[in-house]
Image: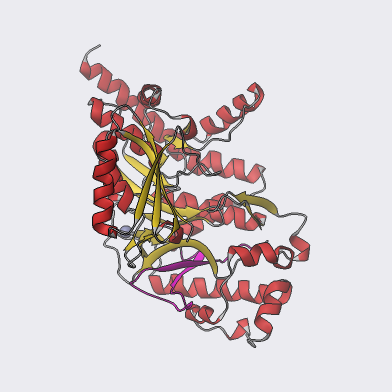
Amino acid sequence: MSILNERAINNNQIVEMDIYSSLFKSVLFPGYERIKGRRTSSLLTAAEDRLHWPLEKIEQYQLRCLRNLLQYCHQHVPYYQQQWRALDFNPQELTSVAQLAQLPLLTKQDIQDNYDLLVPQDKRASNYKKSTGGSTGRPFHFELDKGSYESRQAIMWRGYGWGGVGIGTRTWYLWGVELGSQSWKAKVKDDLFHRFYHRKIANSFALSKDNFQQYIDQINDYQPKAIVAYVAPLYSLAKYINEQGIQLHQPQVILTGAEALLEYQRQEIQKAFRCQVLNTYGCREFMLIGAECSQQHGLHINIDQLVVETVNDQGQNLKNQVGDIVITDLFNYGMPLVRYVNGDQGVISQRRCQCHNPLPMLESVNGRKLDIIRSPQGTILPGEFFPHLLKDFRGIERFQVRQKSLSSLDIFIVANDQYDRAVQDTINGHIKQVMGEQLQVAFHQVSDIPLTSTGKHRVTISEL
Ligand SMILES: [Zn+2]
């Protein structure tokens, strides 16, 4: 077949894809949602419309939604009734979102200890029950109501949309798939469902260096317009593609999620797939919190869905500097989480983005607090240090750094045959240079490093 013919076929495919995408968004998806009795489609339209508002109008909307939520908590949620009694807090008097800071923070531990008090009586039977692996591997449970589910779906699709992966876009997902074997009926049902949504899901948990080629073949066969992926598996696939000099189908954009996207990982993935890689930030408790636009410079925060704050150790609000991320979901009336500390750190700024999206910016999401490594002299190393240091050693397949005491560090390494004592000594030298001679570094060669229950690979774990 001549190149021209091939190109004509590809162009036809692209046109067909675009027709399906717009048909899906305007007809199929709204119809499907209506049958299911859900409002996601109209909420998505409304959420997209809000991006044409000036920021001040969105902030007023956020304030109204916050006031309604707090009023509801005041009347129906026993936990907040108890907590706020001593404060003499009246939600009706709330005149700015900043006043939220007078309320106490809510930790995972608070939720575990007061679970029943946080779920309003009349929501118990109808709530959706969810759980996460939790950063410590201890399961964490929470609930949400139907309205919250619809609203977060809409916000997710809007965020993916400004990255170029709107609903109905032909997308290849490299994502965590439920473990355990499915019946063939369930598989067929899943496959049809994903086809309807115009997407194909590849299991990121099953990716290994022995089957990289199968994943590449799948991308070439499926010809996706976009890729949505976990960072670590896509990065290892990209490294393989670059090392082997493989030319593969070029998507228009890649969105990553579930883990922080570090700059060297972005570079490697962009080189392999020859397209922009955009970061998203979310967590299971709230779904999409923010997403990058094509400027690739910070994430736009969904302030019409959430109140996102950053605070210091005293719980005071911060701007333009690193703080603990604190989130209030404006629409989860099933189990309202007010000022929830989600365990991540980030920087919120007042910078306006150059693009047309009015939503404010989360400049960066830093490593989880647990992931910071400390030296006996008080040096603080962000978790990112170790991937930077270890990425260039070919003998290391995977690693994990654990700190149990201030004076010692354990490094677990899954090694290949290129790993030897000299590699270990070099790494040891680099760490001592930064952290001081007093720090004891112990290396352990292991056959595997377990993933967390949500399929994330934790690079550094501090147990201090
Ligand atoms: Zn932007």
Q: Position of residue 25 (x, y in %)?
A: 49, 43
Identify which residue, 124 or 383, lies in the foreground: 383
Q: Quadrant of residue 73?
A: bottom right
Residue 250 seen by the camera: no
Q: Which residues are magenta?
A: 303-332
In the displayed structure, does residue 27 sit left or right of residue 405?
Answer: right
Q: Position of residue 113 (x, y in %)?
A: 69, 65
**Residue 312 lies in magenta, yes or no?**
yes
In the displayed structure, does residue 186 sit left or right of residue 213?
Answer: right
Q: Position of residue 311 (x, y in %)?
A: 45, 73
Q: Is residue 246 above or below residue 74?
A: above
Identify which residue, 408 or 177, lies in the foreground: 408
> Most extreme residue toward the top, as rendered?
1
Q: What colour scheme has been applied to the protein in the rendered image?
A: secondary structure
Figure quadrant of the N terminus = top left
Q: Is residue 194 above or below residue 58?
A: above
Q: Quadrant of residue 51?
A: bottom left
Identify which residue, 304 or 15, lies in the foreground: 304
**Residue 366 lies in magenta, yes or no?**
no
View quadrant of ligand 1:
bottom left
Q: Is residue 327 above or below residue 225?
A: below
Q: Quadrant of residue 232?
A: top left
Going 42% across and 56% down the picture, which residue do you hit? 371
Give the number of callouts.
0
Q: Position of residue 397 (x, y in %)?
A: 35, 34
Residue 196 seen by the camera: yes
Going 57% across and 32% down the picture, which residue do you hit? 193
Going 56% across and 73% down the picture, which residue do you hit? 105
Identify which residue, 41 or 336, lies in the foreground: 336
